[in-house]
Amino acid sequence: MSEHNANQSARKLQTPEDLADYLDGHLTAVDQYLAHQGMRLADRPFHATVTLVRERLLDVSTDGGNTTYEPNDSCEFIVLPWFRSLYRSVEAWYEGRSGSALGLPSDTYITGVLLFRATPFALRILPTLTRPGDSAGTVWVSWPGHVEEHEVVTQWLVTPPNLSRLTETELATVEHAIRDIAGGLRFVRTSLLGAKSSGDAFLSFAHGVLRRAPGA
């Protein structure tokens, strides 16, 4: 990343330390501006990230410098992987500054509900799949919009019914229902993460849904 500075030449942000120093130097003023606009604290990390990209970054290089993105008036950069990484850093800055007052839910699970025998059972669905990477000590992480056949979906039941007492037909019904629910929730999540739109209203809506979805 390269940041714009009206008084100095462009500064390259190449390490986590560079980024942390950059955020410390700029986010306070951005947050004050958003606060004066009446924006809720929980909504500021997203808008602060967008503001930094639009007003402070000259370009972003990825793939070892082979791909360069130059921010413009469009908001389509929000779907790019580097934006998600920057957003997480901004979010961490806000969490360090505001603590639990920020009220951000965890991305560890997506919450769902299974209705079985007229009784609701809470689901905690993993939003990601992982597998060993090609190099030692690495992993591949994916955000699927469906449920894979190998996933043991009954493990997502927070307090399950007595599965050992269910008939094969009942157990199959439970598993099928969980797959439908989890697949639908994953699809909504990944679709919003990958949605392309230049409209700020849509992007704010998508961010709000994603931020609240894990604890809905």
Image (cartoon, rainbow, N blue to C red):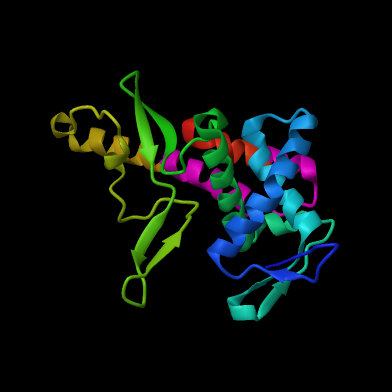
Residue 177: x, y in percent? 37, 36
Q: Is residue 204 left or right of residue 198?
A: left
The residue shown at (56%, 68%) is: 15
Which quadrant is home to the N terminus?
bottom right
Q: How many marks?
A: 0
- Seen from the viewer's position, the closer of residues 50 and 204 is 50
Is residue 47 toward the left or the right of residue 177 in the image? Answer: right
The residue drawn where x is 59% and y is 77% is: 63
On the rendered structure, is 188 left or right of 34? Answer: left
Residue at the farthest left position: 164
Question: Would you say the magenta stretch is mainly helix, strand or loop?
Answer: helix
Q: 203 or 103, which lies in front?
A: 103
In this view, which residue lies farthest toward the front? 7
Q: From the top left corner, tell me how far across and down residue 62 is, in percent.
A: 62, 73
Q: Is residue 203 magenta?
A: yes
For the view shown, which residue lies furthest in the top direction?
Answer: 118
Location of residue 211 in the rendering, given as x and y in whole percent from the top left corner: 57, 38
Q: Quadrant of residue 194?
A: bottom right
100 versus 191 height, above or below: above
- Picture residue at 77% right of the left edge, 68% below the top: 70
The region drawn magenta spans 180-205
Residue 185, how many percent across, how many down? 49, 41
* Vertical relation: 187 (above or below) 157: below
Lateral position of residue 135 relative to residue 13, left or right: left
Q: Is residue 148 magenta?
A: no
Q: Is residue 13 above or below residue 124?
A: below
Residue drawn at point x = 54 percent, y = 63 percent:
16
